[in-house]
Amino acid sequence: MALDLPVLATPYPSLYPIYNLSSFLAPGIVTTATGGAFSCWGQITPNTVMVSIRVNPSGIVDESTGNILIGLPDEFKPVVNTPDSALQGIFLMTDGRIWKRSYAQTGWYLADRTEVSCMFTAPRRA
């Protein structure tokens, strides 16, 4: 499988490449300075998808949608929505979004945080 996404420099990039997914961040959300390109990445294995984010959402343009990441390619879309990540109210959704529940449900706004960190592993679509 070859996706048209930037591949991060890793020791074994040809077996299961790690892709830079920062181009899918919602407007105003940026990767953390300490993580750089490795702050928003994804990997596909034969049976699973993995997505990891470490982002600064304080500049989010539209808090009302709850979207942190939007429009992942089909290869990264899990077969089911993932469980809540670290009880933050954040999920990797089947439609290719990383989504946060509303303030009423979580008690916090994305714009109030300078860092949100989550890692998701989910069954991959057949």
Image (cartoon, grey):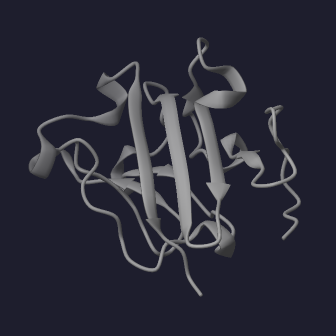
Give x and y (percent) for residue 56.
48, 25
Residue under the point 51% across and 38% down: 53
Residue under the point 48% across and 35% down: 60
Residue 119 vs residue 31, the one in the foreground: 119
State which quadrant residue 82 falls in. bottom left
On-image quarter of the N terminus = bottom right
**Compared to 6, does 93 lie above or below?**
below
State which quadrant residue 116 falls in. top left
Q: Is residue 16 left or right of residue 97?
A: right
Residue 37 vs residue 68, the one in the foreground: 37
Residue 41 vs residue 66, the one in the foreground: 41
Give x and y (percent) for residue 112.
30, 24
**Compared to 126, does 111 lie above or below?**
above
Q: Is residue 25 left or right of residue 98?
A: right
Give x and y (percent) for residue 41.
64, 42
On-image quarter of the C terminus = bottom right
Q: Is residue 45 left or right of residue 69?
A: right
